[in-house]
Image (cartoon, rainbow, N blue to C red):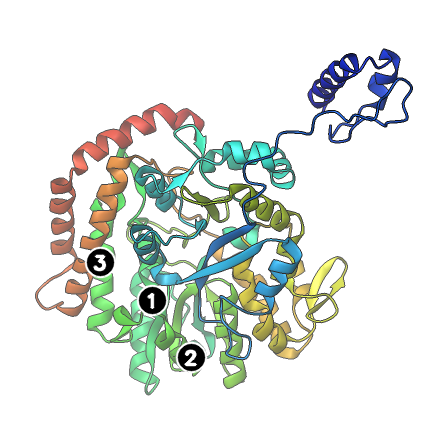
């Protein structure tokens, strides 16, 4: 603020001297910290000539129009509209003063769709993902641009938010420049993946809650053999949960005896693929789960009471709907959160997020970055709240400062999908708020208590993340992207042709491809990165 005043005073003194204005009329006490108003014509010694206007910004005459990506989770009912046009899109345009259009992509195919949009020159102005690794890939490909100068020049609210939360900056920085905007996660969004199990099925078969991976498979077998028509294991995060339980996420690096090792090349990842083969061969999963790209079969099996174990999330709009729909369809159903089970390598938590929420990037070809920054400012200051909680008096009421749903079904239909538009949030939530926020009906209150239990359960075990964020180099990102295609193909081959192939074979093939692609050089780069940065971890 002092620097702003100093610059303004200097400019004002110069103008006053040019107009032969009495110097005492230009005291510091009259300075406007914003530096935007011209001196009053009535000041003694003044003239009718105003000081020269500030230079016009090159984006002032560009239409305030931006496009923003979003995840299509199939939650917009036909009478609400589409993800592109609905009540909230209209509200966003009215309230933000910016002509915003949205580009939805299927959540479980997001990066593939983004790649197509980028290659065809149709990528939106603001493209965001939860995956920092993918953002690093966009940086190295030259798809997105640094945003430091835009934030400094055009932002007020978001710039202030970053100053108040400086711990977020390292997550946004690549090669010394800031390439994304983000906001801070609450505990409820740090917790992510989770497992649920039918307690009523366990009770019916006199089974204990599984605590190891072998016990989990045994329980699933008991479900299949004793619950007619059941598909024991379903979900939309299945492979991610298997990998997390073994501490071998296939996009992450790990530190093994001081050396950097890429997750899919570890022995543990071979065991992940072998587990996936085993449960498929035993008939414990839906035979079509590899092609269930929109997860509709998994959801249908769960909500109709045909599945016993859900590999999904501890909570979240999709999981919340699945659990409450199950309890509505079958009042006797008792879904409960399932704690992480042990593997031969120990007990690791299911996937948990880093403190940074969504990574919102600027397309290098965007026409109006100033409008984009204004949109981020509006979102972090006030836009997010209505998009997350709906309209006060219509969708919620405030109880001790907490937004309590008025009607669960109305909220599900009219508000749940709006959460996707709230790309920045300035939110603080306490655990006890879960109960207060729930609608007053019996099922909502019952599930609110289950959510509180699920949060405690999922955070009992720490997700294995050896570094706060992953190394990002062009050479590494290109190899990782190519290897992922190979991994997906090998997984499908092992699962579908388990009589011929297994996890050990797949691991050998992955290691061969990793080496062929230049994995050894990638390991050297990753090791150098670790040695240079380990003091900061």
Q: CA distance from mark 1 to mark 2?
A: 14 Å
Return the residue at label 1. Answer: 216
- Residue 323 x %, y %: 50, 74
- Residue 276 x %, y %: 24, 63
Mark sitting earlier along the chain (3/2): 2
Return the residue at label 3. Answer: 488
Circle 1 packing at 10 Å, graded few (<14), some (14-19), many (20+), is: some
- Residue 58 x %, y %: 54, 36
* Nearer to me, 358 or 331: 358
SS label for mark 1: helix
* Nearer to me, 121 or 311: 121
- Residue 462 x %, y %: 44, 48
Q: Taking 279 as reference, is 142 left or right?
A: right
Residue 338 occupies quadrant: bottom left
Q: Taking 125 as reference, is 328 left or right?
A: right
The structure residue drawn at horizontal position 30% and vertical position 34%, both measured from the top left corner, is: 473
Residue 439 occupies quadrant: bottom right
Of the 4 image quadrants, the one containing the N terminus is: top right
Residue 183 is at least partly visible in this image: no
Circle 3 packing at 10 Å, graded few (<14), some (14-19), many (20+), is: few
Q: CA distance from mark 3 to mark 1?
A: 24 Å
Question: In the image, which disc is placed on residue 201?
Answer: 2
SS label for mark 3: helix
């Amino acid at each position: 603020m002092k620097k702003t005043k100093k610059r303004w005073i200097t400019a004002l003194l110069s103008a006053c001297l040019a107009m032969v204005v009495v110097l005492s009329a230009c005291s510091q006490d009259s300075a406007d910290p914003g530096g935007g108003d011209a001196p009053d014509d009535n000041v003694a010694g003044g003239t009718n000539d105003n000081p020269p206007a500030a230079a016009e910004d090159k984006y002032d005459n560009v239409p305030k129009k931006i496009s923003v990506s979003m995840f299509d989770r199939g939650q917009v009912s036909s009478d609400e509209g589409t993800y592109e046009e609905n009540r909230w899109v209209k509200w966003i345009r009215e309230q933000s003063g910016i002509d915003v259009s949205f580009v939805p992509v299927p959540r479980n195919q997001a990066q593939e769709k983004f790649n197509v949009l980028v290659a065809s020159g149709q990528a939106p102005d603001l493209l965001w993902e939860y995956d920092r690794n993918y953002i690093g890939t966009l940086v190295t490909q030259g798809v997105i641009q640094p945003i430091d100068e835009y934030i400094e020049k055009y932002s007020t609210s978001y710039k202030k938010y970053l100053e108040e939360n400086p711990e977020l900056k390292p997550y946004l920085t690549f090669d010394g420049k800031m390439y994304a905007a983000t906001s801070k996660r609450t505990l409820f969004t740090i917790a992510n993946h989770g497992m649920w199990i039918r307690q009523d099925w366990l009770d019916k078969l006199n089974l204990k809650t599984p605590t190891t991976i072998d016990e989990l498979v045994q329980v699933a077998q008991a479900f299949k053999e004793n619950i007619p028509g059941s598909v024991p294991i379903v979900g939309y995060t299945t492979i991610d949960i298997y990998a997390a339980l073994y501490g071998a996420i296939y996009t992450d690096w790990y530190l093994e005896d001081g050396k950097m090792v890429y997750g899919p090349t570890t022995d543990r990842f071979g065991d992940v693929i072998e587990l996936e083969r085993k449960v498929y061969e035993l008939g414990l999963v839906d035979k079509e789960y590899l092609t269930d790209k929109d997860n509709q079969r998994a959801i249908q099996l769960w909500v109709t009471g045909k599945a016993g174990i859900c590999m999904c999330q501890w909570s979240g709009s999709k999981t919340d709907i699945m659990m409450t729909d199950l309890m509505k369809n079958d009042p006797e159903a008792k879904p409960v959160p399932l704690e992480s089970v042990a593997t031969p390598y120990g007990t690791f938590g299911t996937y948990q997020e880093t403190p940074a929420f969504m990574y919102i990037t600027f397309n290098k070809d965007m026409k109006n970055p100033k409008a984009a920054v204004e949109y981020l400012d509006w979102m972090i200051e006030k836009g997010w709240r209505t998009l997350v909680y709906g309209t006060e008096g219509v969708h919620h009421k405030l109880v001790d400062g907490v937004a309590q749903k008025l009607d669960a079904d109305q909220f599900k239909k009219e508000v749940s999908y709006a959460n996707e538009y709230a790309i920045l949030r300035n939110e603080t939530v306490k655990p006890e708020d879960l109960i207060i926020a729930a609608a007053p009906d019996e099922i909502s209150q019952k599930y609110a208590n289950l959510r509180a239990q699920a949060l405690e359960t999922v955070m009992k075990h720490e997700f294995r993340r050896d570094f706060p964020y992953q190394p990002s180099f062009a050479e590494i990102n290109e190899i990782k992207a190519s290897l992922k295609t190979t991994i997906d193909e090998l997984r499908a081959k092992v699962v579908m042709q388990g009589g011929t192939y297994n996890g050990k074979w797949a691991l050998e093939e992955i290691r061969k491809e990793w080496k062929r692609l230049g994995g050894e050089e990638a390991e050297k780069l990753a090791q150098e990165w670790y040695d240079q940065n380990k003091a900061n971890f």
